[in-house]
Amino acid sequence: MAADSALLSPAVPAPTPDAAADAAVPEEPAPMSLEECMRYAVEHSPAVRRQDYTNRNYRQDYIESVAALVPSVSGTVGASTSFGRSVDPETNTYTDVSNFDNSYSVSAQMPLFAGLTGINTVRAARVMRLQGVEELQLARDQIALKTMEAYFDVVYYTESVRLAREQLETSTAELEKSRKLFELGLKSAADVAEVESQQASDDYLLTQQENNLALAEIALAEAMNYPADRPLRVDTEVAIETPAGVAPFREVLDNALENNPKAVAAQYDVRHSKLQFSVAKGNLLPSLYVGGGYSTNFFMNLDDRSLYASFPSQFRDNRGFYVSAQLNIPIFGGLSRRTARNRARNNWRIAQQTRTETLRTLQSEVAQAYQQMLGYGKEFVQATKKSDAARLAYEAVAGKYERGMVSALDLQTAADKLLEARSERLRARLQYIIKVRLVAYYNGEPLIR
């Protein structure tokens, strides 16, 4: 494009270095590798950000639960004035004067025993923070896995487009040869028509694969939350990873059931539900609170301010202290505490069943991924042999076709088998790479390296 534009533009003087720098066009972004795509997707994922904000709320809940164990302190300051008929605070008789009254008080209260609800609430909040960490990692892993699948779809269709283009170039060359042989009387019109049909079919296949590639790139950009107005280029050169040192299946499974974010989060959910049940049981027990306070006041006659002592004197002389203890015994409250306890027990049991189901599903996922890794590894080896054999067969049939020993239909059949074998090899190769990385993930290795 740059060269074409230069040919169409009129000749202009060479720009100075400063002018060239000002008029510099932004360079096209470099192709992104698989790790870069997954890292970008995780950093820009709304789901990951949403879980991060949820974790911040978990932290605030933990701070609130810890602060609830600290004595609560409150202070009040009041002021009032009265006009006309009022009560004299010294003689306790009615007077007809204007008065000003000012009061101050500080009080504190703390629970001595509340059925251990405070301690268990702190423990539950701490468990939720730990569960949030695992849920955040799980959200990152899910986004990374989704991006990896979309990335390999792009790689697959990129290679499919290349194979289809090579197939089209080959069939186009064969068509040219067939036409020349027809002119020489070595091929019939039917043979040329067969080759033309093959060339048209290959052209259609190329168009189809190019459309699939465009759709795969759109899906990858969506998985990455990549801006639609920016071009997305990916590095399609993916190395095959050899699982020579892959761990045995039992080791991979045990590691996943113990350390995978799904399993750990489910375990934390059980612990949190159990602590919530303990809190609900504690609300059925009596609670004991103690407290204390300090108060003082100041009084003044607005008509004759000399009748009473000064503010410092009254503030000192009118002060008072108190200590209190309060025992709350739940007797009947509409069965709300009892039903809350029963709901908490049921939620605990639900969390236990959910964890069992999660572990069973995770076990099945690990077993499938491990078996698919082994299967695709064998398929890749066999597909490579099949592709090499199909290529040799096609070359042999093409040579015979040029010598008039086989028909155009035989040539078309050999070409289709070659393309099918190369496509199968490509699919097995990419699936093998995906499953190797997935098994490594279940064995504790991070998806983004």
Image: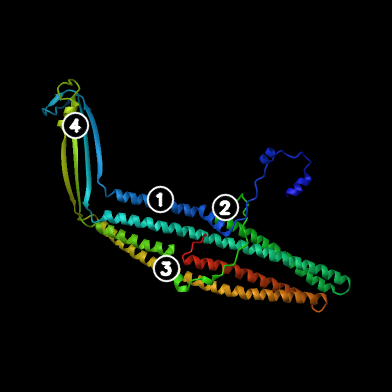
- As helix, strand or loop, the secondary structure at mark 2 comes to loop
Q: CA distance from mark 1 to mark 3?
A: 27 Å
Q: Check contact, mark 3 vs mark 4: CB within 8 A.
A: no
- As helix, strand or loop, the secondary structure at mark 3 comes to helix
Q: Position of residue 277 (x, y in %)?
A: 29, 60
| Sequence-first tag of 1 and 3 | 1
Q: Amino acid at mark 1?
A: Arg
The residue at which mark 1 appears reads as: 56
Q: Amino acid at mark 3?
A: Leu
Q: CA distance from mark 1 to mark 2?
A: 26 Å
Question: Between tags 1 and 3, which lies in front?
Answer: 3
Question: Between tags 3 and 4, which lies in front?
Answer: 3
Numbered mark located on residue 12 in the image: none
Q: Is residue 293 left or right of residue 194?
A: left
Q: Amino acid at mark 4?
A: Asn
The residue at which mark 4 appears reads as: 297
| Sequence-first tag of 1 and 2 | 1
Q: CA distance from mark 2 to mark 3?
A: 33 Å
Q: Residues within 10 Å of mark 3 (few under 14, many from 20)?
A: many
Q: CA distance from mark 4 to mark 2?
A: 67 Å
Q: Position of residue 300 (x, y in %)?
A: 18, 25
The residue at which mark 3 appears reads as: 257
Q: Is residue 366 left or right of residue 338?
A: right
Residue found 79% across the figure and 75% down from its top: 399
**Res 197 quadrant in image:** bottom right
Q: Residues within 10 Å of mark 2 (few under 14, many from 20)?
A: some
User: Count the marks: how many?
Assistant: 4
Depth check: 341 or 151 in front? 151
